[in-house]
Amino acid sequence: MEALPDMRFPNEWVGGTALVAGPVLLLAGVLLRSPFPFFFPDQLRAVAEHPALMTASYTAFLAGNVVLWAAVAHLAHRIGERRPGWAAWAGVLVTVGLFERTFHAGVDHAAFSAVEHLGAERATELVAAGYGELHLFSFLSFTIMAGWVVLAVAARLGGELDGVRAVALASAALMPLGVLKGTELLSVAGAAGLCVALVPLGVRVLAGQPRPSGKTVLVALPVVLGIGALAVVSSLG
């Protein structure tokens, strides 16, 4: 019986691109908000005074977290060829952590909207009133930090990263978690560590792929344009 082709998802093109883009977007988001103090009252004040810069920062950080799911899935698949148990646990933990940061980003966006409509002072009061309320992800916050450490160990045991880059990957656990968090030295160290660990792997994965054929490019162009059009339509409500 003829073997079926490898239909892995995400494939090398998606996974390789995510390995490069995810960490870079995360680092960009961290650096853009670095001029402003760390805690949420100062972050909301910065939103009122520099709305475009802060929106760009938080949007880049959110996009980086969303893109990283494909990077983590691709890396976990590679690890799983040698260490399937480690790959499964690491992939689940990091992915849940990424989901939690995406949830936090939704709260951030709501707070930004409150600043726009209510002003920074009333928005700060609103956020402070509900800051400690429990929700599903309150019980899963440990995954944001522990997941990267487990993934780093798995990648080292699976032979995907050397010792230095495994430590760099584990440093992603240093990035502070929670709603409306600014930038501190640990934030930069963690995001930069992700770049050191994952970007070279992504470049290597992409470099190993065959050049797309003319037919593939012709098919991809209208698909990309169509997705862009759907994105615009989706924003209309």
Image (tube, grey):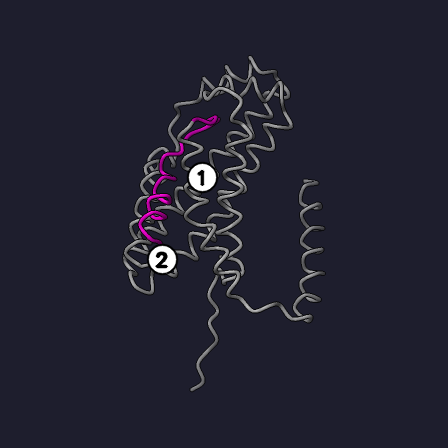
Label 2: element kind:
loop
Q: Is residue 103 left or right of residue 91?
A: right
Q: Where, by quadrant of the figure, is residue 86 drawn?
A: bottom left
> Closest to the observer: 129 or 196?
196
Q: Of the two numbered discs 2 and 1 on the same chain, state the one appearing first in sequence.
A: 2
Mark 1 packing: few (<14 Cα in 10 Å), some, or many (20+)? many
Residue 127 on the magenta segment: no
Q: Where, by quadrant of the figure, is residue 234 drawn?
A: top right
Q: Which residues are magenta?
A: 161-184
Residue 125: x and y in percent read 50, 14
| Label disc, if present, on residue 132 of the rendered structure | none
> Closest to the observer: 158 or 226?
158
| Label disc, if present, on residue 160 of the rendered structure | 2
User: Which amino acid type is shown beneath numbered disc 1?
Assistant: Ala
Q: Is residue 194 left or right of residue 79?
A: right
Q: Quadrant of the N terminus?
A: bottom left
Label 1: element kind:
helix
Q: Where, by quadrant of the figure, is residue 177 drawn?
A: top left
Question: With respect to residue 159, does 121 lie above or below?
Answer: above
> Closest to the observer: 126 or 18?
18
Residue 119: x and y in percent read 61, 15
User: Which amino acid type is shown beneath numbered disc 2?
Assistant: Glu
- Kindly identify which residue carries mark 1: 192
> Closest to the observer: 236 or 198?
198
Q: Quadrant of the C terminus?
A: top right
